[in-house]
Amino acid sequence: MTTNNDRLFLITGATGNTGKTTVQLLLERGHWVRAFVHREDDRSRQLAATGAEIVVGDLLHFHDVSAAMRGVSGAYFIYPIAPGLLDATVTFAQAATEAGVRSIVNMSQISAPREAASNQARQHWLAERLLDRTAMLTAHLRPTFFAEWISWWWGRQGDEGVLRLPFGNGRHAPVAAVDQAYVIAAILEKPEPHDRQVYPLHGPVEMDHYGIAEAASRALGIPVAYEPISVEEFADGLASLGASTHLIQHLSNVAIDYQNGVFQGTNNLIEVIGDRSPMTVEEFVIDRRYAFDRNGSRFVPPKSASDSSERRMFSDDENYRTS
Ligand SMILES: NC(=O)c1ccc[n+]([C@@H]2O[C@H](COP(=O)([O-])OP(=O)(O)OC[C@H]3O[C@@H](n4cnc5c(N)ncnc54)[C@H](OP(=O)(O)O)[C@@H]3O)[C@@H](O)[C@H]2O)c1
């Protein structure tokens, strides 16, 4: 690899939605990149093939994280929607501080106020405050729902698509993970102006889920319906598919936040910081057409509670993330 400077960046969640593109962008820009991955698999091998140094570890294991920080100048921290966010944050902060890391970018979320009802969202707020107490240049990202949500909860039977979600008439401007990666890479490259900033990240067009269904319909050329469901029905559906109580508690509460307008709004931070025009929903659906072309879903009514194809999709869908 040819590098344009001697800075080394550590990217956690490197096989995840935002991490993998951040790794690619930094490599393309000639930086050294250490990709922290949870396991060795095809995703990590793809990162290695493009020139990233691969480190396998667990964000909850201090010695893994400490070893990965050696020589690092800037680091991106993400932790999935799972128990352990605060442990992982303290671990990351201590390891980075000991290693003399200069700057960090922290993935939080828009529904992370001090009073958040979701346990995970409140922990995101606490994690932000903890990282603010370090001496490192620190920036927090608070995205609204990712555009990827549309594919995670997508249902299709033949030539009809459906989104069954507990969002009522609430609105947001879906923001693609790839667009967020441009912001993450830009802040890592030049962290000074972003110190102690909290950035809500939005896509280009705010819409409700009727509008999102229409945009998906235009992109795919098939009818797509939005069918609002109750938060309870959503939670029951998640439980029947084997989701953890932590995830159900989080998603149920953010659904209520969503209905109350917490996720709404739009801004131009992807352009201003990331120097990138963010994708519209139509562009996103066209780009991920493979995810929308297959039949099946989590919430299109399964033939029976034990419908095995339904369960298989939930557990094996490589696009599904607990975030
Ligand atoms: N999705 C949304 O709409 C949304 C909106 C706002 C904010 N967010 C925030 O975005 C974050 C998720 O970001 P993302 O979507 O880029 O990530 P992601 O796709 O969910 O990927 C998570 C990554 O972390 C790795 N990982 C999981 N547990 C780990 C552990 N214990 N140690 C080391 N690595 C571990 C996973 O590897 P494996 O797959 O190998 O386990 C994966 O690479 C969450 O904090 C969420 O709150 C999401």
Image: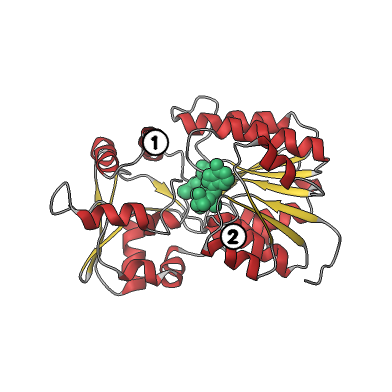
Quick check: 134 left or right of 41? Answer: right
Quick check: 272 left or right of 155? Answer: right
Dot 2 corresponds to which residue?
A: 20
Q: Are marks 2 and 1 in contact (CB under 8 Å)?
A: no
Q: Nearer the viewer, residue 94 or 299?
A: 94
SS class of the residue under badge 2?
A: helix
Image spot of residue 225 (x, y percent): 24, 59
Image spot of residue 30 (x, y percent): 78, 68
Dot placed on the residue nearer the N-terminal end, 2 or 1: 2
| Category of crowding for the residue at label 2, using alpha-carbon neighbours closer than 10 angstroms: few (below 14), some (14–19), many (at least 20) | many
Snapshot quadrant of residue 5: bottom right
The answer to whether the beta carbon of the residue marked 2 is less than 8 Å from any atom of ligand 1 is yes
Residue 276 visible, this angle: no
| Category of crowding for the residue at label 1, using alpha-carbon neighbours closer than 10 angstroms: few (below 14), some (14–19), many (at least 20) | some
Quick check: 10 left or right of 248? Answer: right
Q: Amino acid at mark 2?
A: Lys
